[in-house]
Image (cartoon, rainbow, N blue to C red):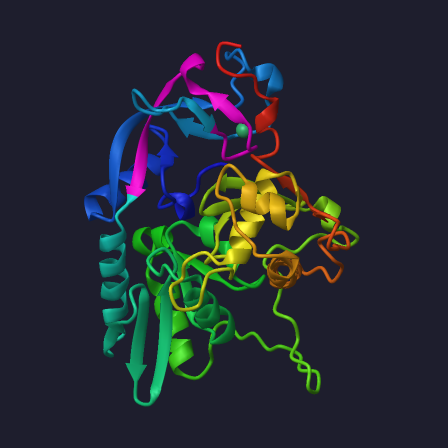
Amino acid sequence: MQLEIAGLLARGAIVDPGTALTTFAERLVADGVARGSARSFVRCANPADFDYVDADPACAGRVAVPGDGMDDWVWCPGCERRLETSRKQRFDAIVLEPDAHALRARIGQMLQALGTPVREHPEGVFRVESGDTEAAVVLMDACDSLPIRFSLTAEQGAIAVAADRGRFSWQLPPDTPLLSVAELVLLSPEPLLAATRAALAGKPRAIVVPVAAPNAPPPPAARFPVPPGAGWQDVTIYYVDGATVGIAVPGARPVHASAIELGMAKETSLMPSRRFALLLHLCRHRGRTDWKTAGRAEEEPIAFDNFAAFRMQITPLRRDLQRLFGLTTDPFAPIGRSKPVIAAFRALREAPGEAAYLPRGG
Ligand SMILES: [Zn+2]
């Protein structure tokens, strides 16, 4: 997980002093697209630390030491275990935080070089016009609507760029290029300009052609595809907070996702839908509930008038889960008026592994 130029504008990128990347990091700060601050960090796998016995020696994960008064247990981005930062050896480094406003300005500025009008609409989506043609460049970090990001980039072949690529690459179909803003700023804007020119010339850089079956539109690509042969028993969904779940499938890093990102928000208000609340509730109750239990839950109860109203939410939740994971089987055991709903996936109250850690001082 060695940091590369492309990763310098990920949120909280840690750069060691005196390395080849230090100069690049300083240039991003001088350029105004990132702020740099001196911070201490700890290494996940450090033979000098007390917790090296639990570490994957190959994990290159590092985390910045939280400020005073903050929780000093921090997730390792490399292996997803928790690190007790206050007890580990500290190293000095520069931590970069990208400036969203400056990044937008910078992308707009780069596109000016094409000599054609550029307008940003909505935020994070740059439209470049030439004659009758329009090409779109989506700065994923600045465009906060996943449906817009996804439909523009996947369906309309817009050019995708991102400062924090790791956050967005999973939202694009495989093989869709995702340009790194750090590379465009530090190395050359040419890849962006070339892609935009090609799109204006009618050769969109990313074309997604679904194979159309008569009268049956193909299902959209699964957002969290499971490996061949895997099923619901291999899917883990866990509670993160009242607006977010964590999702883990074999062969991929766990991802946090909101109702909007899962397509489970109300269309007009973008508020989490009732079925998303039900998913959170299922996680809280380890994958097992019924309509009466849901209404009596201590945390975030969801009242249902009767079993039928409950089933009316299970049905769209089933469809959403099948779509997200690309599975056609039922994510729930058969339900009935007197039978609870039981998830076929692992529904957990917290991230897997977290429960294994003793409380501090324990
Ligand atoms: Zn680690």
Going 61% across and 69% down the picture, which residue do you hit? 220
Q: Position of residue 251 (x, y in %)?
A: 66, 45
Q: Is residue 217 left or right of residue 180?
A: right
- Which corner quadrant of the image does residue 322 belong to? bottom right
Where is residue 47 drawn, in percent x and y? 54, 14
Measured along the vertical axis of the image, is residue 109 above or below residue 135? above
Pick the residue in front: 271 or 302.
302
What is the count of numbered marks?
0
Ligand 1 image position (quadrant): top right
Residue at the far bottom in the pictured view? 132
Q: Quadrant of residue 234?
A: top right
Residue 211 location (% of width, % of height):
67, 79
Residue 115 at least partly seen: no
Q: Is residue 138 magenta?
A: no
For this view, does 178 lie left or right of residue 248?
left
Residue closest to the far front: 305
The stretch drawn in magenta includes residue 85: yes
Q: Is residue 155 above or below residue 76?
A: below
Q: Can you give x and y, in whole percent of width and height, for residue 199 in the image?
A: 41, 78
Residue at point 39%, 17% (across, down): 90
Residue found at x 69% / y 53%: 226
Residue 132 visible here:
yes
Q: Is residue 332 above or below residue 58?
A: below
Q: Nearer the viewer, residue 61 or 340?
A: 340
- In magenta, the rendered stretch is 75-97
Residue at 33% across, 27% down: 93
